[in-house]
Amino acid sequence: MKLTTRSEYALLALVYLARNQQAEGYISIETIAKAQGIPPKFLEQLMLALKRAHFLRSTKGQHGGYALAKDPSEITLAEVIRLFDGALAPTESVSENFYESTPIEKEKKLTRVFKDIRDYVSQKLEKTTIADVMK
Amino acid sequence: MKLTTRSEYALLALVYLARNQQAEGYISIETIAKAQGIPPKFLEQLMLALKRAHFLRSTKGQHGGYALAKDPSEITLAEVIRLFDGALAPTESVSENFYESTPIEKEKKLTRVFKDIRDYVSQKLEKTTIADVMK
DNA sequence: TTCGGATATTTCCTATCGGAAGTATAGTGT
DNA sequence: ACACTATACTTCCGATAGGAAATATCCGAA
């Protein structure tokens, strides 16, 4: 799992929205970008992807912007990272869902180590939600 | 369902890869872009998204490029369109998975029409695969 | 007042840039 | 013949440009 800045920015934006969600209020990219220090045009792409994946809803125009489409407790870190960075496993030969052969497979003990890591990482990311990190 | 050129380009690229798969090992963005008339730098973004979603695999460097990660018969049009354009339903109030209230709901007969459309579209896109359209 | 149009605002979409990182091949010196 | 280096190639990543589409607000005319 290689955490790109894409994922980091996306998580930051979601946390910001979770913290500042008011009833039916939308928050603009500009506001989030300024608050979290994210290049606004880059963030725009990430927000659109998050919207397509149904984590966010939006409206255009004045007073437009983005809001969470579900409760912060229903958005896991795993989902977000998978969306932007692909698989969670450190290498494909230990991936549960997307197995492919890689060199380390020749050493079973080595493979075991990375499987343990995969299990820990995925369990941790799967059970931690935006709600857990917003306070 | 608003079919953007993103989705169209992505489908074109997948069909091209399906047609030319065992011939060459990996096929470059440049080759696909030229063959299908797609702006190469734009296609690059789409290919990366398709890779992250595990429809493609890739290698870098000389003789590098992209190849299908699964059989063409296992890639439905629905999956690809959802990835790039979000929900399939023509409007959210008739969406099975992502319901949200919209104005037409007030007229039940109207709603019925769009639900019928949704059913037909999703059934059609869900059961048509890249393999079906590659010949 | 009330309607309609102009204006401002913000998402949404297509497209491109520049460079880092990884991979294969060619060339060079011993 | 072999090791090492340079080079060419291609994905991968962060970032930005420009304009269309949608929405809210403001202002002037009747």
Image: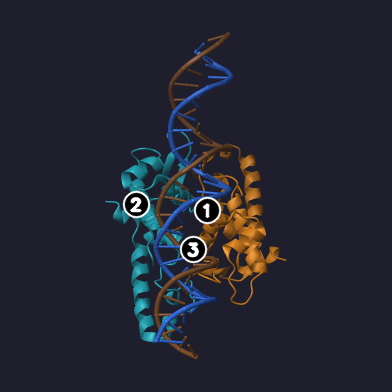
Chain colours: A orange, B cyan, C brown, D blue
Quadrant for residue A78, please give it.
Answer: bottom right
Residue A76 visible, this orientation = no
> At x 44% / y 67%, what residue is drawn?
B87
User: Label 2 is found on which chain of the structure?
Assistant: B
Q: Are marks 3 and 1 on the same chain?
A: yes
Q: Is residue A85 above or below residue A72?
A: above
Direction right: furthest residue: A135
Direction left: furthest residue: B135
How far separated are the C-alphas under marks 3 and 1? 23 Å
Residue that label 3 marks: A52
Q: Position of residue A123 (x, y in %)?
A: 64, 57
Q: Position of residue A105 (x, y in %)?
A: 57, 40
> At x 34% / y 76%, what residue is drawn?
B116
How far separated are the C-alphas under marks 2 and 1? 26 Å
Q: Is residue A107 above or below residue B105?
A: above
Q: Is residue B58 left or right of residue A123?
A: left
User: How many marks can you see?
Assistant: 3
User: Label 3 is found on which chain of the structure?
Assistant: A
User: Label 1 is found on which chain of the structure?
Assistant: A
**Closer to us: B94 or A15:** A15
Q: Nearer the viewer, mark 2 or mark 1?
A: 2
Q: Which mark is residue B12?
A: 2
Q: Is residue A113 left or right of residue B56?
A: right
Are dots 2 and 3 in contact, CB under 8 Å? no
Q: Which mark is residue A123?
A: none
Are dots 2 and 1 in contact, CB under 8 Å? no
Residue that label 1 marks: A97
